[in-house]
């Protein structure tokens, strides 16, 4: 035990003097967190808070155009503009503004669109009630144009198109209903239908983010980036840890360690313990910093959910996985350059796969499957479960088991490599 | 006997020849034994096997009647190792390095501090001991490396070229220190390329070539083998040139 304490103290001294390693562990993830949270904040806000910038050219100036304008003004998802430089723009001007990226998309309601719907419905009612076929009288079709910023994602275009089609269909239904009511009055004098379309609307949609908790936490850049970059920073322990193992081998102390009393593996155990504690300190500091600092720079407040035990277990699982991976990297590499390059590259690749850099939801299906191999993804999914879904230990158990198994596999391989090298 | 090695063999992966081949060695308590030979003779490999850094491919080693293979922990406590590479942590100072080594031998508290202080003073390190090892000259690093190997008062000390690449003053200090250590009864096994130094220090010398012990004796016995070898240096040059020692030449 005394030897283990001596080794722990030695490791703590060494890491406290490794300024580059400490900067890598504590400064780099904070910088990533701040930059990525601020950079992605507007992307999240465009959907949830400030809305997507939309340009509407209402050439119709009648029921359809008015309904659509009112509807878009009332929704949360868009920030509606109807003028450019204080006047209604031409189609060409609207096209240029959307191409420049000033608006995510533009909608052009042509002149006479409402009237065309009315005429077509009137024709239909008249024909139905009189029993005459009057469909030969052609009504000029009108075209509602939607123009998109070329950088807009295809999936986003599909979503917006569907929403607008649904919106326009509702407006058409209102016009049809109104025209039909007027038609009935005209064809059957004395009948005064007092029907209301709203009365038929018996199916309602209630949309909410699924959550076990009573608190309603919206996904935002902070809820994604804080766990993401904390996990990334924790896994970057691989570089200083592997570097420390290599330095010991290259600079000579490993020879002394092999001749000192106690098993050589005790030195690795002490190293593992100290770096494990460092990753936990890193986690706690990142959480405190995110909670206190991010609101000061105008970012949303970090919500932890309601399960402190689950958060602690996830942090321990991640710290074990990260330090285990560092031990393995340090053991298989033979030079510091190999450890630094190999360690950082492997973490970057696992981070990219795991949804740290690019959120999982915009990845193609096969990438979502591939991402499951990354321990960083297990950590991120675990924190999503706790922070966003309000889940607890039972729900994050699969991620904890995966992280634990990853740690055990890394340590088993480390011991195997040490034995092979020693023999 | 203090050290008994029997039929040691060691080869490295990727090498066709054995680094050490059928080596037998017996060293008595209190001897100052020099292990000499040209580059690649197997000196460092032999030292590394004797102190447990490498496992021999075959053969047996006993230190103070205890088998290194079956009782490595007991052996570790009675041997001290001063490797050729500086086995120190460069970002720690002398005190921190030595305290770490002492604690690993379960030496703690007042006893540890006294031992460190006495060796630091003896080797003239007092003024520098609070500075990080990375800022030291080669001689200063060698001194700390030496103290780390003998801090726990071992019965046997293995020194692999302890005076290589250092100034004359530091070399003299280290040599005097080693002589004194041997006078106190500590068995010393030592390798060096400096033949004058070996001739002066060693009570017995073993000459290795291509992993085999080709000659063994006191410095006087070895230099008396042939008038041409009146200096050990000549013997080693002959060995390096011819690959063997012909006493009739």
Image (spheres, rainbow, N blue to C red):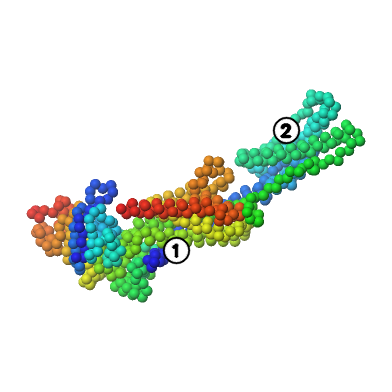
| Horizontal side, residue B29 vs residue A223: left or right | left
User: Do callouts 1 and 2 point to residues on the same chain?
Assistant: yes
Position above or below: B115 against A128: below
What SS does tag 1 mark? helix
> Residue drawn 45% across and 49% down?
A346
Please provide percent x and percent y for residue A201.
77, 42
> Residue drawn 16% across and 54% down?
B239
- Count the marks: 2
Position above or below: A240 against B181: above
Position above or below: A354 against A118: below
Disc 2: host chain: A
> Residue drawn 60% across and 50% down?
A40
Label 1 packing within 10 angstroms: few (<14), some (14-19), many (20+): few
Please provide percent x and percent y for residue A153.
61, 41
Label 2 packing within 10 angstroms: few (<14), some (14-19), many (20+): few
| Mark-to-mark CA distance, 1 and 2 | 69 Å
User: Which residue, as the protein is rendered here, is positioned at the far front?
Assistant: A394
Residue B217 appears anywhere in the view: yes
Residue B127 appears anywhere in the view: no
**Which residue is at the front of the view, A218 or A28?**
A218
Q: On the image, which quarter does residue B45 sit in?
A: bottom left
| Horizontal side, residue A242 vs residue A356: left or right | left
| Horizontal side, residue A250 vs residue A118: left or right | left
Give whichever of discs 1 and 2 has the lower sequence position: 1
Please provide percent x and percent y for residue A398.
52, 51
Q: Which mark is residue A143?
A: 2
Q: Which mark is residue A16?
A: 1
What SS does tag 2 mark? loop
| Horizontal side, residue A287 vs residue A16: left or right | right
> Residue drawn 51% across and 46% down?
A372
User: Which residue, as the protein is rendered here, is positioned at the far left?
Assistant: B248
């Amino acid at each position: 035990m005394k030897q283990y304490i001596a080794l722990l103290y030695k490791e703590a001294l060494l890491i406290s003097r490794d300024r580059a390693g400490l900067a890598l562990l504590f400064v780099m993830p904070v910088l990533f967190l701040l930059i990525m949270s601020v950079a992605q904040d507007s992307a999240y806000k465009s959907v949830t808070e400030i809305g997507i910038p939309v340009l509407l050219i209402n050439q119709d100036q009648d029921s359809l155009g008015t309904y659509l304008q009112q509807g878009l003004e009332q929704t949360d998802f868009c920030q509606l503009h109807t003028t450019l430089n204080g006047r209604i723009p031409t189609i060409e001007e609207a096209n240029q503004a959307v191409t420049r990226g000033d608006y995510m998309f533009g909608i052009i309601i042509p002149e006479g669109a409402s009237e065309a719907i009315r005429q077509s419905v009137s024709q239909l009612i008249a024909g139905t009630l009189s029993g005459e076929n009057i469909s030969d009288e052609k009504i000029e079709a009108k075209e509602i144009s939607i123009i998109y910023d070329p950088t807009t994602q295809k999936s986003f275009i599909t979503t917006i198109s569907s929403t607008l089609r649904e919106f326009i269909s509702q407006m058409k239904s209102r016009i049809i209903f109104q025209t039909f009511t007027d038609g009935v009055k005209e064809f059957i004098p004395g009948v005064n239908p007092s029907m209301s379309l709203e009365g038929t609307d018996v199916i309602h949609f209630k949309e909410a983010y699924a959550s076990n908790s009573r608190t309603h936490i919206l996904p935002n850049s902070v809820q994604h980036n804080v766990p993401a970059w904390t996990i990334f920073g924790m896994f970057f322990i691989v570089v200083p840890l592997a570097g420390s193992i290599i330095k010991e081998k290259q600079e000579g102390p490993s020879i002394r360690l092999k001749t000192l009393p106690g098993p050589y593996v005790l030195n690795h155990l002490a190293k593992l313990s100290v770096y494990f504690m460092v990753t936990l300190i890193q986690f706690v500091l990142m959480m405190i910093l995110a909670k206190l600092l991010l609101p000061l720079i105008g970012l949303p407040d970090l919500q932890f959910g309601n399960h402190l035990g689950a958060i602690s277990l996830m942090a321990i699982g991640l710290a074990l996985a990260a330090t285990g991976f560092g031990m393995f990297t340090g053991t298989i590499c033979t030079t510091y350059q190999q450890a630094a390059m190999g360690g950082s590259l492997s973490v970057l690749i696992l981070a990219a796969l795991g949804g740290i850099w690019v959120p999982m939801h915009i990845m193609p299906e096969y990438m979502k499957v591939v991402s499951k191999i990354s321990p960083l993804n297990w950590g991120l999914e675990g924190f999503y479960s706790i922070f966003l879904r309000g889940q607890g230990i039972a729900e994050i158990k699969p991620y904890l088991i995966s992280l634990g198994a990853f740690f055990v596999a890394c340590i088993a391989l480390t011991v195997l490599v040490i034995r092979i090298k020693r023999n | 006997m203090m050290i008994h090695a029997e039929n040691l063999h060691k080869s490295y992966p990727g090498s066709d020849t054995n680094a050490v081949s059928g080596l037998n060695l017996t060293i008595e308590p209190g001897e100052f034994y020099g292990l000499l030979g040209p580059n690649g003779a197997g000196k460092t490999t032999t030292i590394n096997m004797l102190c447990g850094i490498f496992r021999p491919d075959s053969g047996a080693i006993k230190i103070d009647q205890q088998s290194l293979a079956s009782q490595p922990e007991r052996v570790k406590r009675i041997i001290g190792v001063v490797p050729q590479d500086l086995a120190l942590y460069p970002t720690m100072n002398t005190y921190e390095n030595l305290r770490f080594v002492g604690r690993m031998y379960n030496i703690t508290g007042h006893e540890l501090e006294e031992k460190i202080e006495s060796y630091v003073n003896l080797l003239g390190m007092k003024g520098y001991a609070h500075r990080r090892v990375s800022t030291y000259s080669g001689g200063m690093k060698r001194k700390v490396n030496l103290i780390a190997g003998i801090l726990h008062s071992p019965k046997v000390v293995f020194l692999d070229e302890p005076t290589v690449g250092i100034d004359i003053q530091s070399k003299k200090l280290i040599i005097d220190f080693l002589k004194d250590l041997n006078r106190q009864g500590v068995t010393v096994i030592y390798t060096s390329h400096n033949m004058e130094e070996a001739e002066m220090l060693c009570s017995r010398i073993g000459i290795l070539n291509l992993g085999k012990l080709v000659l063994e004796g006191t410095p006087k016995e070895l230099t008396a083998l042939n008038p041409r070898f009146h200096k050990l240096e000549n013997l080693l040059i002959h060995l390096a040139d011819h690959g063997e020692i012909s006493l009739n030449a």
